[in-house]
Amino acid sequence: MKLPTFRYLSCVISITLLLSTSLTSQIVNATEEYFGQFDSEPSFTVKTNNSSRPTFVLNTDLKFIDPNSFNWVAPAKTEVDGASIPSFAWSFVGGPMSGKYLHASIIHDYFCITKERTAHDTHRNFYYGMRAKGVDESKAKLMYLMVRTFGPSWKITYTTHSLKGFEKTITGYTPTAEISELPLKQKEEARQYINNLSETLERSNGKTAPTVCQSCATYQLPATLDNLDRISEELSKKLK
């Protein structure tokens, strides 16, 4: 027995819509970016001192598993104070040792102290940690460029020894730099660019970033982490 034409078409449309909705849902879920996860909330004791910022002493380990499944662990008794984050960046986020920034800042501080992994990977992991805790893309990318440009930097080299195996050497270490320490001209250029970057990232929801070049200031790039690395390198050269 044949269904009437209108009933047949109605069934086809219903099935098509159902399949379309299901497929769309699968695509959204499949493309949702994963930034990693922390295994717990940080437990710490605040130690006051004569410094302008308090020191946080971890009571328990804080572990972060990044998107590539690498473990980043700040062990109990670690002392951190957010010193790996340039203080100028704090004016944009209200302090890295608070709110959604706290977890990522603790891990970042610890690995900037120990230098167990490269500066590049440590700063990238800071971005992943912020995003994993819900920091929006524009703010996380601004903070990433700040630590990439003004945060601690070092290189790791490995030398092969027939008896010892690999020997690790830390070279080229530079501590966190502060914009306030720059000569006046470079200081103003840095402030101008970072304010422009912050506004551009905010307007584009973290998708575009301005170039450093003043004569092409209206030109913008996709704000990928690789492009932010290139911008950081250009900005560093300009401020020397």
Image: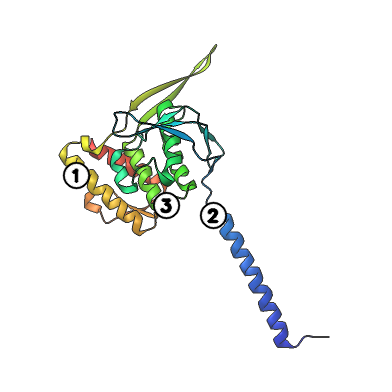
Instruction: Kindly report the distance in space between the C-alpha atoms of the residues bearing marks 3 and 2.
Output: 13 Å
Q: How is the image coloured?
A: rainbow
Residue 92 in the image, given as x and y percentages of width and height: 31, 48
Callout 2 secondary element: loop
At label 2, counting other C-alpha atoms closer than 10 Å, the crowd grade (few under 14, some 14-19, many 20 or more) is few
User: Do the numbered discs 2 and 1 sit on residues whose CB atoms are within 8 Å?
Assistant: no
Q: Is residue 212 visible?
A: no
Disc with the residue nearer the chain's start (3 vs 2): 2
- Image point (57%, 39%), residue name: 69
Which residue occupies 31% across, 43% down?
A: 89
Q: Are marks 1 and 3 in contact (CB under 8 Å)?
A: no
Which numbered disc, 1 or 3, marks the residue that appears first in the sequence?
A: 3
Q: Secondary structure at mark 3?
A: helix
Position in image of residue 33 (x %, y %): 52, 51
Name above or below for residue 194 compared with residue 149.
below
Instruction: Say what secondary structure mark 1 lies in.
Output: helix
